[in-house]
């Protein structure tokens, strides 16, 4: 079978043939290793970098909006406080 490797396990009484999926289509080990690295980068590392960038952008936007909201609320508090009449300043 193409794409599988058969392993034969046996003892004095019986034997078992186990077929496992493998990269049998590669001509050399270096090609198999290169393909494994390609898969690692495309399937794991590249999506992880893209997700980290996107989450960083979202967190930055939320942080800035929270900061801006806190400034607006603080400014609104100062504007809504009534002014004290002259001569009755807080001590």
Image (tube, helix red, strand yellow):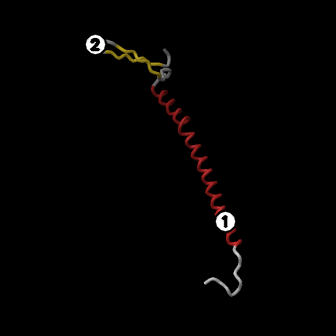
Residue at 71%, 83% (x, y): give it: 85
Residue at 39%, 18% (x, y): give it: 7
Q: Element type at marker 2?
A: loop
Q: Which residue is denoted by mark 1 in the rendering? A: 73
Examine the image and state in which quarter residue 16 appears: top left
Residue 12 is marked as 2
Extreme residue in the top direction: 13
* Rendered view: 49 above or below 13: below
Residue at 65%, 58% (x, y): give it: 65
Examine the image and state in which quarter residue 61 appears: bottom right
Q: Element type at marker 1?
A: helix
Residue at 67%, 70% (x, y): give it: 77
Report the front residue among 85 and 60.
85
Name the side, left or right, on which 83 lies relative to 37.
right
Residue 67: image location, x then y, percent = 63, 61
Residue 70: image location, x then y, percent = 64, 63
Report the front residue among 37 and 89.
89
Extreme residue in the bottom direction: 87
Examine the image and state in which quarter residue 12 appears: top left
Crowding near pointer 2: few (<14 within 10 Å), some, many (20+)?
few
Residue 24: image location, x then y, percent = 48, 21
Extreme residue in the left direction: 12
């Amino acid at each position: 079978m193409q794409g599988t490797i058969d392993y034969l396990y046996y003892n004095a009484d019986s034997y078992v043939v186990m077929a496992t999926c493998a990269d049998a289509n590669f001509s050399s080990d270096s090609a198999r290793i290169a393909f494994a690295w390609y898969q690692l980068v495309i399937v794991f590392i590249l999506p992880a970098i893209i997700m980290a960038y996107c989450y960083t952008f979202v967190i930055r936007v939320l942080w800035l909006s929270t900061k801006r909201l806190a400034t607006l609320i603080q400014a609104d508090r100062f504007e809504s406080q009534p002014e004290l009449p002259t001569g009755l300043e807080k001590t």
